[in-house]
Amino acid sequence: MAKRMGLMLLIVGLFVAGIGTYKFLQIRAAIAQGGAYQPPPETVTTVVAQEDEWSSTLRAIGGVEAVNGVTLSADLSGVVREIAFQSGQRVGKGQVLVRLDVATERAQLAQAVASSDLAKLDLERAEKLVERGAIAQSELDRMRAQAHVSAASVDGYEALIERKTIRAPFAGVLGIRRIDLGQRLAEGDAIVSLQSLDPVYVNFTLPQGDVTELKVGSAVQVSSKEAGLSRVGRITSVNSVIDPRTRNVEVQATLTNNDHQLRPGMFVDVTVDLGKSTRAIALPTSSISYAPYGNSVFVVEEIKDPKSGKAYKGVNQRFVKTGRERGDQVAILDGLKPGDEVVSSGAFKLRPGAAVVVDNKVKPANDPAPKPEDN
């Protein structure tokens, strides 16, 4: 009985050991097969790196501002008696726009003129009486002072009447009027906006690192796709203070605007020509993998498999120094050489050493001045 039991235990032990050995060999074979597995190559598009003439320009978004622009308002309260302009009208400097009712002031002026005339007559009589010794010199001085006060009163009423006539302080184009005939205006009420539209300012900001490259007189290209316009101006001022919050500097350019297409408040695209150019490799922006630790690209090369020793077409990651952008392109200042084949799309799915298949039937644009159809 004991012999039979021992034999059975031996058989069971051998069976379990056999199964364990089989599973061990099976798992080891699977591990070996997994280690030898090569993922299928990724399909990418590429571009051959080439040096190009890269003009130094700065780009920004600017706002149009009138050289002279105000909202005219009532200097004094009064009732609108005459409106001498139309909305959108071009006016010259000093042209009358609005007259307020001055009937009361004119009556007061007439009274002041009469008092002034009387004071002058009294002064003339007093001067003759002083010569005869009929009145004291002090009385003459009092009358002379009274004549001066009366004359000043006349000047005051004349100035008051003039202030109730609103004139254009400079030549320009009026906006939409905000008043009606017979309306009573309070002091400071808006009447109409007046903008001088030729020339105009374009104000924009640039990073503080570009301050040293900015020069008064540099050419500025201003364009607006929405308005369908493009024109050239010049930098006329660079702010002496950098904004401590944004670390940007404000720049002002002046442009002619004789057709009045540029209106105050418009947003425009601004390109500053720094007047110099460099040689740089131009790549599509889609080629660059941007990261906090550095920007990089993937270069297609022949790579040797360390296990099998076979060569295959794969990619290596290279860190590059990028410059400014233009259109679809970005300048590569360091990290590549002309002739390198760089992945232009599909870089997000790659890793160093990955196998690739190049298919350039459809690839990203690499145009320095793109003109999309739906712009």
Image: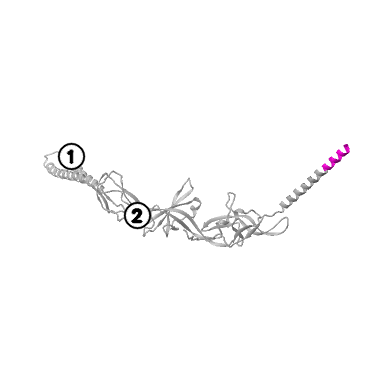
Mark 2 is on which residue type? Ser
Main SS of residues in magenta: helix
The amino acid beneath tag 1 is Arg
Residue linked to disc 1: 142
Q: Is residue 15 magenta?
A: no
Point out residue 229 in the picture as x, y percentages from the top left corner.
42, 59
Mark 2 = which residue?
A: 196
361 in relation to 99, above or below: below
Which residue is located at x 64 percent, y 56 percent? 316
Q: What element does badge 1 sit on?
A: helix
Give, as a single range, the part of the protein colored magenta: 1-13
Whether pointer 1 and pointer 2 mark residues with C-beta atoms closer than 8 Å, the reply is: no
The answer to whether residue 15 shows anywhere in this view is yes
Query: In the image, is 173 to the left or to the right of 61?
Result: left
- Observer-side mark, 1 or 2, equals 2
At label 1, counting other C-alpha atoms closer than 10 Å, the crowd grade (few under 14, some 14-19, many 20 or more) is: few
Q: Which mark is residue 324?
A: none
Residue 111 appears at what percent x and percent y? 17, 43
Q: Position of residue 165 (x, y in %)?
A: 25, 49
Residue in front for this viewpoint, 312 or 214: 312
Q: Nearer the viewer, residue 294 or 316?
A: 316
138 above or below 233?
Answer: above
